[in-house]
Image (cartoon, grey):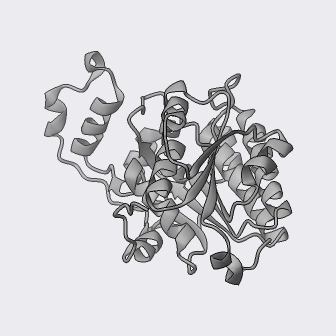
Amino acid sequence: MAPASAFNEYSRTVCVMDASGSLGTTLVHRLLQRGYNVHAAVQNHGKLEYFEELSSCNSKKLRVFYSDPFDYHSIMDALKGCSGLFYSFEPPSDQPNYDEFMADVEVRAAHNVVEACAQTETIHKVVFTSSVTAVLWSNDRNKTSDDLDERNWSDINFCRKFKLWHAMSKALAEKTAWALAMDREINMVSINGGLIMSPDITIANPYLKGAAEMYEDGVFVTVDLSFIVDAHICVFEDVASYGRYLCFNHVINRNEDAVKLARILLPPSESPHPKSFEDTSVHQQRISNKKLNKLMVDFDSEVQID
């Protein structure tokens, strides 16, 4: 691992893994616009439109790698010469849906990638993409008036009992990454994002399991794609960043907000009736993103063309 003081000595080359989805692809473009050299690590199961978008990019600062999180050598190839890694997990094509076995898959992938970072000589910082679902599920979720924040973890047994597979997978993978990062002395931060409002979002998104309970508890949060991308870059560039960061910029705690979201997620034939807006009840927000907001106060989100 390279010492933090040596960061400025390295070229501004970073790796985005997995760059196969909307988050990874958008992150690649934003990094290129900020002047970074980018290694975009994509998997064969990646959505074709995102891969074609990357492949058609004429930037000399972009290199595209095929990288399998279960193939250690392909990970090392993508990381070679990079000072940082932005890591997020995309389910394999033969197991696209979250179920009780997905946790093992996601944990192994996280372990392989973080271990590979430990074996490189240039990686200075890892930004690990996790989820708010790794924070909010536990037996005592209604027994405290305190806001949920980065200190909270979803209870694995609770998630297993209620088949909250996305939450269980994210919590176990993130805990695995943190344990290994601390053992290998890797400088890592995590972004625990809300429901990402990407163009391809649907009602089938596994984050939405338990949405009604999240809504009633005042912890149902979403995040604009551009905002979570900025958050990733901010925590990477800010030397003061540390630990976990809850990342969201919308709280769904009013009936009006829930109906509007449903109209985005559902096909027109299943959209809520206009009378659904008549309910004016509001659920008290019980989740905090103050830590991230404080860090991002001075972040320049305007793209800079090199």
Residue at 80% x, 73% y: name it: 185
Residue at 78% x, 48% y: name it: 77
Residue at 29% x, 19% y: name it: 270
Residue 174 x %, y %:
69, 55
Residue 94 vs residue 56, the one in the foreground:
56
Residue 82 x %, y %:
69, 60
Outermost residue to the bottom? 5
Residue 262 x %, y %:
31, 33
Residue 269 vs residue 22, the one in the foreground:
22
Residue 40 vs residue 88, the one in the foreground:
40
Residue 75 x %, y %:
78, 47
Above or below residue 153? Residue 184 is below
Q: How many marks?
A: 0
Residue 94 vs residue 28, the one in the foreground:
28
Q: Seen in the image, is 156 located left or right of residue 251?
A: right
Residue 221 seen anywhere in this rendered image of the structure? no
Occupied quadrant, residue 191: bottom right
Q: Seen in the image, is 303 located left or right of residue 170?
A: left
| Image quadrant occupied by the N terminus | bottom right
Residue at 63% x, 35% y: name it: 163
Residue 298 seen anywhere in this rendered image of the structure? yes
Above or below residue 80? Residue 274 is above
| Image quadrant occupied by the C terminus | bottom left
